[in-house]
Image (cartoon, rainbow, N blue to C red):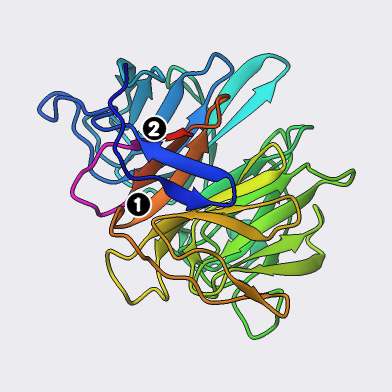
Amino acid sequence: MAHLGDTIYGQNGLFYKQQLGWGILDSRKNPVNDCHEMVFDNSGQLYVLTNETANNILIYHQSGDLLGYWGHGFPGGHGLSIADEGGSEFLFVTDTKLHKVFKMSLSGEIIMTIDCPMETGLYKREEEFIPTETAITQDGDFYVVDGYGKQYVLHYGHDGRLKGWFGGKGPEVWHLDNAHGICVDNRNEMPTLLVTDRTKCCFKRFSLTGVFLEVIAIPGACVCRPVIHRDMIFAAVLRSPNMEVMDSGFVVVLDADNQVVSSIGGTAPVYQDGQLLAMCQEIPLFKHPHDVCIDAEENLYVAQWSSGRLYPYKFIRV
């Protein structure tokens, strides 16, 4: 039986206990540096992306056992997404040091490479393109956020041809500052895009063609990518209450109305006159959470950046 910690984290019916020791491996054989992002495949295997080139991808069973590993060529492995194309699954990996995006098989075969889109006229040098995340639509189009570069969202067709772009840095509400993550929100009849504006502690919603729609503010929470599970949004908060404070992260959960209802390691969400009060770390459970993943039993997995080469944590829903 899994050994759980005594502390219960969360609020409003979303409570979790940490499964102590989950996923810890022999660091001499399977080291990690920054554990950046995670996805589940259709069989329930958890893929963890690290920028450690001894094994960029670790594949876990939900029990914490290692099922496999591969990848030695992604020194800046950062973003990890998964797509199902008629029963065949593919991974999308962004590399901030190689300045590229890769579409790959689950076993690591490269299917497609996306380079700096020089044809846009937005870039003078390939090194200015520093992609951090991807999101894939149900028809196979995909979006790349240049979250450490020019702050644009680039729209590609299934064949890898550039179809358009929007965003960029600037003073308008639709501009982006540290567009770290992106996901397709299919919770409503019309799919939309949620894009992280991490410096400004919010997500921004756009249409699939780049029309700005709304801001989902989470003051004090420098959020990473939004992860949608059923009707809720989960997100790792890298730092709080701003990007200047180290070792200050936590995890937030938003409900179907995009209201924060629970936090793991952070202050409890409080709304006054319809506005969320600024959040911050309350318990030093994490240093720099970078991504969350949710399994079919509602358990959480949390990967961390710059946190002492830690393997992901698992939290059991209670």
Magenta-drawn stretch, dominant element (helix, strand or loop): loop
Front-most of 14 and 206? 14
Viewer-side label of 1, 2: 2
Tag 1 and tag 2, C-beta contact below 8 Å: no
Instruction: Give the residue at the far right of this rendering.
Output: 189
Left or right side of 161 for 283: left
Q: Which residue is mark 2?
A: 48
Q: Which residue is mark 1?
A: 97
Q: Quadrant of the N terminus?
A: top left
The residue at 72%/80% (across/down) is 273
* Residue 316 - label: none
Above or below — where is 2 with respect to 113?
above
Provide residue 47's location: percent of width, then percent of height: 43, 27
Q: Which residues are magenta?
A: 305-314
The residue at 36%/65% (across/down) is 282
Left or right side of 315 for 14: right
Left or right side of 298 for 264: left
Front-most of 118 and 58? 58
Amino acid tagged 1: Lys
Q: Secondary structure at mark 2?
A: strand
- Give how far apart the Cα atoms at labels 1 and 2 are: 18 Å
Above or below — where is 207 with respect to 93?
below
Camera sees residue 268 = yes
Q: Is 15 within the magenta?
A: no
Q: Is 311 within the magenta?
A: yes
Provide residue 132's location: percent of width, then percent of height: 48, 53
Camera sees residue 95 = no
Instruction: Give the residue at the far bottom of this rendering.
Output: 171
Provide residue 5's location: percent of width, then percent of height: 29, 37
Above or below — where is 102 with respect to 129?
above
Q: Earlier in the sequence, mark 1 or mark 2?
A: 2
